Image (spheres, helix red, strand yellow):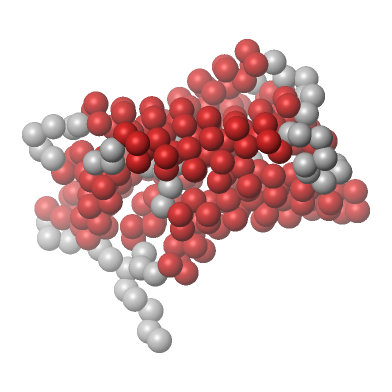
Amino acid sequence: MPDTPAPPPGEIFNRAVEEGERRLDQSLLELVSTSFIAGFTIVFGIVALGIVEALVEPRFGEIAKITGALAFGVGLVFLVVGRTELFNENFFDPVAAAADRSESWMLSSLFRLWAVTLVFNLLGGGLFALIFSVRGALPAGTAEALTAFAEETARQGAGAWFASAIAGGALVSLLSFLLVAVNGVRTRVTLAYVVGFLLALGPFNHVVVTTLHVFFGILFGANVGFGTLAVMIAVVTAGNLAGGLGLVTLTHITQAMGARESGG
């Protein structure tokens, strides 16, 4: 079966506008629900990463980081297939829809989408982290792996958090762009898995994933205070906005709008 040719930038933009309008037009109840679902869905990827690292590290050392990242990739697959709402992954399409409406940039609608998504991603994920933190709920060694990540991340400091978050924001927003540029469920699943693997391999900071990962560590006794976690959330969110909106979303939208105007 011959490969389907990649759509031109103008067509990608049109697809993004359609998807962005769907996301922006969600009722509050639908947005809260899909954001909450995305939060606890991504927890399964974090748990899988911790379990695999705990199993592999005693025998194979640093190889455990790679296998853990491979395990985490399924979390993003669940998100993409389930069409849930993850902060930062919902930058490109809604901004394309806003840019397409010449009379308004729809700033209030965009803020509503992103604020609700972030809050309920964290609430949904935090609830499941509490459930998994019950003694005996996870295999032996998982708590230690999650605790080590939390303490290592906290030691990096704000500068490293921000730089890593720029990369993480760019990577996840790039996924959003690529998903509207391809046809077929298999390709979408593959893209989601690859991006999930790269995000965890870095690891590159994504405010929801990193916050929940560190929160897990705190629940298991990591030497990280909630004040540090709050600062981390603010810094990583700013980095995700810089990388996701500045480096990926706005540049791709500018490219696509220019191509559409020229007939490409």
Compared to 237, does 67 lie above or below? below
User: Quadrant where the N terminus lies?
Assistant: bottom left
Most extreme residue toward the left, as rendered?
Answer: 103
Q: Position of residue 166 (x, y in %)?
A: 49, 34
Residue found farthest to the top: 227
- Near-viewer residue (44 or 62): 44
Left/right placement of residue 185 relative to residue 148 reads left
- Tell me if 209 is positioned left or right of 257 in this view: right
The image quarter in which residue 228 lies:
top right
Can you see residue 195?
no
In the rendered image, residue 257, in percent from the top left (x then y), is placed at 19, 49
Looking at the image, which residue is at 62% across and 37% down? 128
> What residue sits 18% from the left and 32% below the top?
105
Q: Is residue 239 above or below residue 53?
A: above
Is residue 82 something that shows in the picture?
Answer: yes
Image quadrant in which the C terminus is located: bottom left
Is 151 rendered above or below residue 89? above
> How far from the left and from the top, in percent, is residue 123?
53, 30
> In x, y percent, where is residue 259?
19, 55
